[in-house]
């Protein structure tokens, strides 16, 4: 593992470079398929050619930890680095992510009967545009299905499908979903034989929860302290079911794909891509074909905030995300032929 030869994030001459840290670890990435029409090939012919870095690690695992890497990444806080996590918590948590299942997105790819040379992914957001869409069967016919946060499925299968291959969340967004969407049937993370869980870590809570859930031990400290092992992912979950986005990947997405004007405002310390945006862009970097459903489109005002809302609700805009910028990015990726975005 090495680093991109860009300007050092510690260069005192340019404070903005120090904050952004446009320098990332390099993984020797080997595509998991030999798809002749993969996104990685298509992107070279688009306006995203210089933006897209295929070598940035999407997932972090045991081999990414070292004292030198901790020193580098501790300069960035929240989801963009390790500055919000103690070295001991990080070390003991990443140490258990030591298998190919933790390192590879499609760890079961060779066992599956993929119908073509290409991995087709459905990435499902929670936007109201999906209500009444009847896209469920189409979604489930993809090789893999990505979902995030309050992914309510029961009762909405005809519109959103029933499979979940990957579930993206942070401890904070997950617990908020449990509180906010219990009334519409969201009571646990999706659970099935194929489901993998991808943490978007922005705090030590994520590393602590992942370790406790993997080892089936109680959480002994912090905000999520419990006397029993966490059971959000089923009683038989194993460490092979867990993955974690690499903070370099989150920072790269913020810096290069979703470089908001908020980065020059008082909001810059809390701004990051939304959980759904990270999920969709992770699929862009790992799948051969991406079909996106339930993401914001220019006519978003016609629809409720979520497809499962019992009473129509306006879309919420939050200070820590730039949803308008994300909407514009989805349109650009769709027009470039890099994703197929569901629009009515």
Image (cartoon, rainbow, N blue to C red):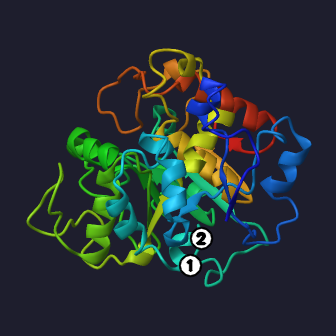
The residues bearing labels 2 and 1 have C-alpha atoms spaced at a distance of 6 Å
Q: Residue furthest bottom?
A: 111
| Depicted 287 relative to depicted 316: above or below | below
Q: Which residue, given by chain and number where applicable, does mark 2 sit on?
A: 104
Q: Position of residue 58 (x, y in %)?
A: 60, 57
Residue 90, horizontal then vertical, whole percent:
38, 61
Question: Which secondary structure, mark 1?
Answer: helix
Q: Are marks 2 and 1 in contact (CB under 8 Å)?
A: yes
The quarter holding residue 338 reads: top right
Residue drawn at x 33%, y 33% as measured from the top left: 309
- Residue 341 makes an appearance in the image: yes
Q: Which residue is mark 1?
A: 100
Q: Is 32 placed above or below 75 here?
A: below
Q: Residue 111 or 243: which is nearer the viewer?
A: 243
Q: Is residue 193 left or right of residue 293?
A: left
Q: Residue at x 42, y 28 (%)?
A: 270
């Amino acid at each position: 593992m090495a680093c991109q030869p860009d300007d050092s994030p510690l260069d005192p001459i340019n404070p903005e470079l120090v904050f952004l840290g446009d320098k990332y670890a390099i993984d020797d990435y080997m595509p998991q398929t030999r798809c002749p029409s993969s996104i990685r090939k298509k992107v070279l012919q688009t306006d995203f050619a210089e933006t897209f870095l295929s070598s940035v690690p999407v997932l972090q695992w045991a081999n990414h930890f070292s004292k030198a890497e901790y020193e580098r990444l501790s300069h960035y806080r929240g989801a963009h680095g390790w500055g919000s996590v103690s070295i001991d918590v990080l070390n003991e948590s990443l140490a258990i992510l030591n298998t190919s299942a933790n390192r590879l997105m499609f760890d079961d790819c060779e066992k599956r009967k993929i119908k073509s040379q290409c991995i087709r992914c459905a990435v499902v957001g929670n936007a109201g545009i999906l209500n009444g869409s009847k896209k469920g069967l189409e979604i489930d016919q993809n090789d893999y299905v990505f979902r995030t946060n309050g992914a309510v499925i029961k009762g909405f299968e005809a519109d959103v499908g029933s499979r979940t291959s990957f579930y993206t969340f942070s401890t904070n967004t997950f617990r908020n979903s449990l509180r906010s969407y219990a009334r519409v049937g969201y009571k646990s993370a999706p659970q099935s034989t194929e489901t993998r869980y991808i943490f978007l870590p922005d705090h030590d809570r994520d590393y602590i929860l992942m370790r406790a859930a993997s080892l089936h031990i109680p959480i002994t400290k912090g905000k999520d302290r419990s006397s029993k092992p966490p059971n959000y992912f089923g009683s038989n979950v194993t460490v092979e079911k867990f993955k974690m986005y690499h903070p370099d990947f989150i920072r790269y997405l913020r810096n290069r794909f979703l470089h908001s004007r908020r980065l020059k405002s008082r909001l810059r310390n809390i701004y990051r891509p939304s959980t759904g945006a990270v999920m969709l862009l992770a699929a862009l970097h790992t799948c051969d074909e991406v079909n996106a459903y339930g993401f914001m489109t220019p006519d978003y005002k016609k629809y409720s905030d979520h497809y499962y809302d019992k009473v129509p609700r306006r879309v919420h805009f939050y200070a820590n995300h730039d949803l308008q910028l994300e909407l514009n990015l989805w349109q650009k990726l769709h027009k470039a032929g890099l994703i197929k975005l569901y629009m009515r």
